[in-house]
Amino acid sequence: MMFVEKPWNKYTITMNIRAVFLDLDGTLISFNTHDIPFSARKTLFRLKEKGILLFAATGRGKDGLAILEGLPFDGFITLNGQYCYTTDGTILYENTIIQEDLEVLLKELDRHPFPCGFVTRNTKVFNYRDARVEEVHAITHNDGHPAGDISGILQEPVYQVMTFLNESEEKELLKKMPHCTSARWYPTFCDISPLGGTKVKGIDVFCDYFGIPLSAVMAVGDGGNDKEMLKHVHLAAAMGNAPEDVREIADLVTADTDHDGIWKLFRDLDMI
């Protein structure tokens, strides 16, 4: 594990950690096996035995969390912060795209069609699928939802939209949707979300609910949608498979997901 230079050592920074927020895809879940390594599963249970609260912080929706079944999580930041709830189902925060911005998006789809996945509370529906959608699903194994009828989408609460656009197209679309923001972890698509709900917002919501100060919080991530979360917490760790701009933000860098990065991270910090 590589430590980025900081004015403290690993013993002083970990002794008061009470909560860990973990990204899923590329952090806890391997992009290659589409599963959670056994070493990572074991690590989560050992952290829980130490009394540390565990939270998933992901762009996935509630319908994509079956892979976490049986793991000792205390809560879930889903849809990049738009829908946050505890293990017992208590909803702590939810945030949806306003109708005005959805209407703009639908007009853009009429004029210049591109694939969109509209994410509701329990599922998502695509206007249509093409090679870009299939490429992302091949990585996540979480986006196999069929294309369907989106004519009634304005009557649905929409928490997030998967938009298959390049970066310049994304910027032009956001200019027309002023109440939204975007997050990108792959070149061919980005998530469009309402302003206000972010992984940072989710962390603050859970810290308030459980009475945890930020000085006792750690986060682990690997993608562009983790950058603000990593900047926000007391101790930030990046996976070895994270791009350079994410690793530069982190206080320390561990191995990649497929080489027991989660286990090595907490082992080397003497937290398990």
Image (tube, rainbow, N blue to C red):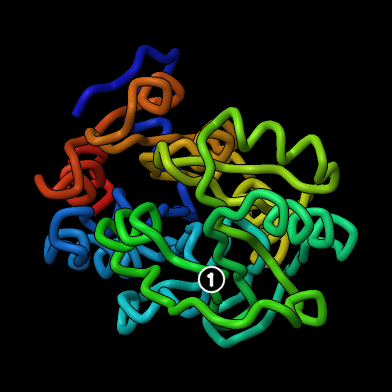
Side (left or right) of 270 relative to 247: left
Residue at the (62%, 37%) spot, across then down: 170
Q: Is residue 161 left or right of residue 242?
A: right
Kind of residue indicated by mark 1: Phe
Q: Is residue 196 rendered to the left or right of residue 53?
A: right
Image height of 155 relative to 231, above or below = below
Percent from the top left, x then y, of residue 183? 57, 42
Q: Quadrant of the C terminus?
A: bottom left
- Quarter of the image where the N terminus is located: top left
Nearest the eye: 205 or 94: 94
Say if 159 sits above or below 172 in the image: below
Q: Quadrant of residue 247?
A: top left
Q: Which residue is mark 1?
A: 126
Measured as percent of width and height from the top left, residue 267 is found at: 18, 45
Q: Callout 1: helix, strand or loop?
A: strand
Q: Along the line of sight, which residue is nearer the eye, 242 or 181?
A: 181
Q: Is residue 209 above or below residue 167?
A: below
- Quarter location, residue 231: top right
Give 42 or 167, whichever is nearer the viewer: 167
Please state the horizontal and vertical placement of residue 237, each as a whole percent of the image: 37, 36
Look at 30% across and 76% down and name the residue there.
Answer: 67
